[in-house]
């Protein structure tokens, strides 16, 4: 990639004027009947955003499918794009044989920079450091939106660099997903789930509740996330046809004699049966994982309570 002239020579606060306050922001909620093409056009750059992701040892810039943030029911669905590592980075070999699973690459790593002191990379006093601002500008296209996982970072970057940023609850779903797939991109990095990026995303919580699973945030583990993702792939457990539609298919069956290819119909039927059985199996596996997590959680809670009681008793004896 070619770097813009003058970036290295100029201090970060002189590179770009602050954004115009009168400029209409493009990160609002989707309009009624707005297609993905309309969303991409509104966001600019074909809907592609940049994503600034903070790791324990530095910062990374990712390319990101920004349309994902503004689809209908985005809050409920984003988590599944990061349920397995292949969803965010690459296709797993087995998925190449499963045409019914729609897998999309939603993020791709562009560059990573390590920082000995991350607090000096971006803060309210000094703004954005030269090293971090060079990395951002190296990949930033004109008028491209930058997604960040910290409201303070959003304010600093917009004021000091003039780059429009987004940081809202849907973006935080993406940051939650990025923490889950971090080992795929940065093998030596360890996930840090902070209060800004909780252990369970809101979308995953909504999905588990809808399927009758009562899971506390402390119980969530990789197995639960991955099996929930499998269940998500098989679709919402709703009837494919209404009672009326089924009756019409039966009553009008004679009208399709010699007008349809039985082989094709059989293929469709087999795929529907496979999906139905797969959904039931994945739900059963998820239930097993949830029960295991509940047992482990209860054991840990009892152990913690016992330790607390013993510590209180010890203090009481020492006081007497």
Image (cartoon, helix red, strand yellow):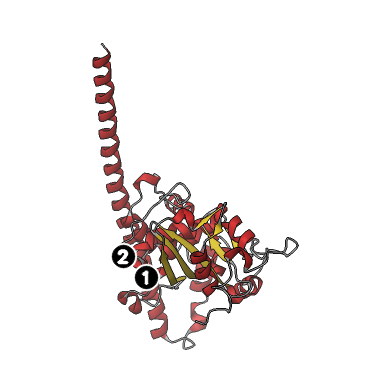
278 or 135, which is in the foreground?
Answer: 135
User: Which residue is denoted by mark 2 in the rendering?
Assistant: 187
Q: Is residue 216 above or below residue 65?
A: above
Q: Position of residue 31 (x, y in %)?
A: 67, 64
Q: Secondary structure at mark 2?
A: loop
| Among numbered discs 1 and 2, the one appearing first in the sequence | 1
Q: Are marks 1 and 2 in contact (CB under 8 Å)?
A: no
Q: How many marks?
A: 2
Which part of the image, by quadrant, shows the C terminus? top left
Residue lying at the far right of the rendered structure: 22
Residue lying at the far top of the rendered structure: 320
Could you tell me which residue is drawn at 35 percent across and 57 percent down? Answer: 283
Q: Position of residue 269 (x, y in %)?
A: 39, 75
200 or 33, which is in the foreground?
Answer: 200
Q: Is residue 117 above or below residue 295?
A: below
In the drawing, what numbered circle is on residue 86? Answer: 1
């Amino acid at each position: 990639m070619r770097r813009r002239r003058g970036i290295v020579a100029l201090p970060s606060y002189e590179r770009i004027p602050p954004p115009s306050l009168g400029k209409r922001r493009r990160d609002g909620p989707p309009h009624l009947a707005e297609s993905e093409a309309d969303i991409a056009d509104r966001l600019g750059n074909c809907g592609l955003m940049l994503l600034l992701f903070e790791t324990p040892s530095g910062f990374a810039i990712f390319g990101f499918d920004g349309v994902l943030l503004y689809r209908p029911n985005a809050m409920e669905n984003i988590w599944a794009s990061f349920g397995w590592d292949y969803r965010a980075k690459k296709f797993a070999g087995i998925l190449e044989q499963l045409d019914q699973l729609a897998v999309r690459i939603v993020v791709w790593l562009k560059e990573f920079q390590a920082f000995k002191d991350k607090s000096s990379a971006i803060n309210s006093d000094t703004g954005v450091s030269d090293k971090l601002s060079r990395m951002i500008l190296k990949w930033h296209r004109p008028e491209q939106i930058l997604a960040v996982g910290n409201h303070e970072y959003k304010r600093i970057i917009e004021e000091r660099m003039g780059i429009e940023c987004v940081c809202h609850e849907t973006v935080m779903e993406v940051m939650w997903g990025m923490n889950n797939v971090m080992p795929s991109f940065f093998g030596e990095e360890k996930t840090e789930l902070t209060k800004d990026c909780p252990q369970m995303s809101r979308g995953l919580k909504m999905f588990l509740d809808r399927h009758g699973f009562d899971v506390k945030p402390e119980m969530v583990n990789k197995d639960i996330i991955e099996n929930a993702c499998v269940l998500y792939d098989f679709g919402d457990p709703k009837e494919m046809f209404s009672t009326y539609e089924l009756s019409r298919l039966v009553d009008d069956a004679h009208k399709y004699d010699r007008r349809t290819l039985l082989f094709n119909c059989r293929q469709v039927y087999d795929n529907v049966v496979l999906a139905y059985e797969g959904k039931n199996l994945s739900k059963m596996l998820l239930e097993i994982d949830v029960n295991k997590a509940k047992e482990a959680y209860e054991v840990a809670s009892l152990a913690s309570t016992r330790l607390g009681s013993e510590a209180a008793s010890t203090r009481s004896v020492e006081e007497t």
